[in-house]
Image (tube, rainbow, N blue to C red):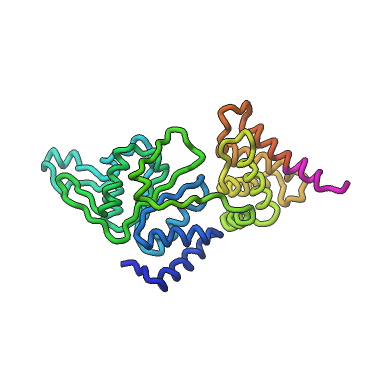
Amino acid sequence: MTDLTAGALTATRDRVAARLVGRERELDLVLSAVAAGRDIVLEGPPGTSKTTILKAITAEWGIPLLFVEGNADLTPAKLVGHHNPARVLREDYSADNFVAGPLVEAMSEGGFLYIEEFNRAPEDTLNTLLTAMADRSIAVPRVGVIEAKPTFRVVASMNPYDNVGTTRLSTSVHDRLNRLAIDYQDAAAEAAVVELRTGVSGKRATDAVAVTRATREHPDVRQGSSVRGAIDLVLVARELGQLRGVSTPDDAGYPELVYDAMIVALSGRIHLDEAAETTPERVLRQIWEDHFVLGPATAGPG
């Protein structure tokens, strides 16, 4: 069983923190909630370390992390499990031919059930989760009662910037979940993430972070790119630089190289406002010009 005494919890936090860039406060809060036996919803845009934190905690505890995508097709049967149809025809229903779904698997193994896009799941599916969260057990027809191991947790995530196809969660669901809002990190922390993931530092990393962060503030963009876009931008630019013979930010072709890498890495990650009469490419060109043309001109002498 996982040791959740004060000293052990502190040691766990320190080891998990070594795998993250920043996020000390968020790690403390998530770890405290799950160590207290609570289920929690993490509310924030993609690319804000939610999955990274959960992977690190479950790896440290030695328990599974089971992923489920919340959508209209997530039925209670898909979440709980089903009886193998072929075996049912041969043997009739029995506990032996029951195929556990992610909820039963997480309960049986004491893992975290991580449901992404939680507010896209149907209401009857969420009601199944309510029983598991409230009683730490569920009754499965023709199988029996499944009791959850002590480390079982339900962890959900929601994107506050995405309200298309989502539903309002009921009071009963909110009442059984702790909540933590996780936003983007600052520019310095994101540059450190890019450096860690790519091995590239200096101006190439800070330029990638700057133009990526600018997608989140552009008036025509409903949701901009996460730091994953900056990571891919750096990686694409590095390979493109080899093809073009552009090896440093001081080379003449560097700015245009960054723009081309932006198109590949960022155009599919930004979501335009429905009323915007533009394209991702035009938005990225404007961001590029602001950074590489207008920015240096403003900073120059005179």
> Please, which residue is most extreme toward the right here?
302
Q: At 68% across and 47% down in the image, what residue appears?
A: 241
Instruction: Tell me which secondary structure the magenta stretch mostly adopts.
Output: helix
State the residue lying farthest toward the bottom: 7
**Residue 211 seen from this side:** yes
Any part of residue 242 in sight: no
- Residue 215 to residue 278: above or below: below
Q: Where residue 226 sits: x, y (%)?
A: 56, 46
Write the residue at 64% across / 49% down: 209
Residue drawn at (58%, 40%), measured in percent from left and top?
224
**Would you say 40 lies left or right of 17 here?**
left
> Residue 175: image x %, image y %?
36, 48
Say if 166 sits above or below 3 in the image.
above
**Would residue 126 appear left or right of 302 to someone viewing this image?**
left
Q: Position of residue 160 (x, y in %)?
A: 49, 42
Q: Is residue 259 left or right of residue 3?
A: right
Q: Where are the magenta residues, as a range?
A: 291-302
> Who's the residue at 28% across and 52% down the image?
134
- In the rendered image, the quadrant that contains the N terminus is bottom left
Which residue is more in the foreground, 174 or 133?
174
User: How many numbered discs sit on the rendered protein?
Assistant: 0
Give coordinates of residue 284: x percent, y percent. 65, 37
Q: Quadrant of residue 259?
A: top right
Residue 6 on the magenta segment:
no
